[in-house]
Image (tube, helix red, strand yellow):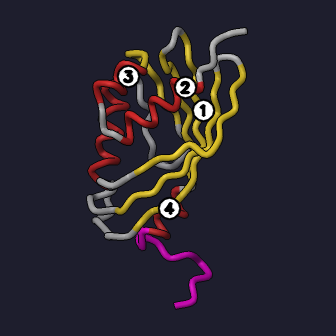
Amino acid sequence: MSKSNKPLVLAFVAATNEQNWAKVNTLLHENVIRHSSTFGMQTVTNSQQLIDFHKEEVTAFPDLKETVIFMVEEGELVAARIHFRGTQLGKLGKYPPSGKVLDAYFQCFFKVRNEKITEIWAEYDQLNGLIQLGHFKPLHHKD
């Protein structure tokens, strides 16, 4: 039986929460790729770009915390449902700080080879986030 990659993914989430970028870097392949079909997301093509992406997230949400709800593993792939909670105290793209809390879930898929994360697919509901943060009103809003 092969070694589970779940602990590596949990270590990645924990190190990101702790903003321990040196630890994050040890868990990533230097040419890690992060994909997302979420509108406006750029593909990340190396470990420094991914760390910079997470640093920008922390700038926007200094108290952010990600919690893995569950994981499923098949071979070198680990799928995770992750809870994200953070207060937007910094700029988020073109959106100014709102002071509101984003409380949402997203799906992330990790490919692990030779005990390094080599590829990530992250998908989340950006519209839900913008509504929660007060940057967008839903179509059927009551006010």
Residue shown at the point (59%, 78%) measured from the top left? 139
Choose the circle earlier in sequence order: 4 or 1: 4
Choose the circle earlier in sequence order: 2 or 3: 2
Q: Which residues are magenta?
A: 133-143
Q: Looking at the picture, how far across and down is residue 31, in whole percent?
A: 41, 17
Q: Is mark 3 in CB contact (under 8 Å) with mark 4? A: no
Task: Classify 127 as above or below 21.
Answer: below
At mark 1, the secondary structure is strand
Tell me the distance, in whole angstroms, between the alpha carbons under discs 1 and 2: 14 Å
Q: Looking at the picture, how far across and down is residue 130, in whole percent?
A: 46, 65
Which residue type does callout 1 highlight? Phe
Q: Which residue is mark 2?
A: 7
Tell me the distance, in whole angstroms, between the alpha carbons under discs 1 and 3: 17 Å
Figure quadrant of residue 86: bottom left
Q: Nearer the viewer, residue 6 or 105?
A: 6
Choose the circle earlier in sequence order: 1 or 3: 3
Q: Which residue is mark 1?
A: 109
Which residue type does callout 2 highlight? Pro
Residue shown at the point (51%, 91%) measured from the top left? 143
Figure quadrant of residue 6: top right
Residue shown at the point (36%, 18%) measured from the top left? 26
Q: Which residue is mark 4?
A: 103
Q: Which residue is mark 3?
A: 46
Q: Nearer the viewer, residue 48 or 16?
A: 16
At mark 2, the secondary structure is helix
Q: Nearer the viewer, residue 10 or 80?
A: 10
- Give the foreground label among 3 and 4: 4
At mark 3, the secondary structure is loop
Tell me the distance, in whole angstroms, between the alpha carbons under discs 4 and 1: 20 Å
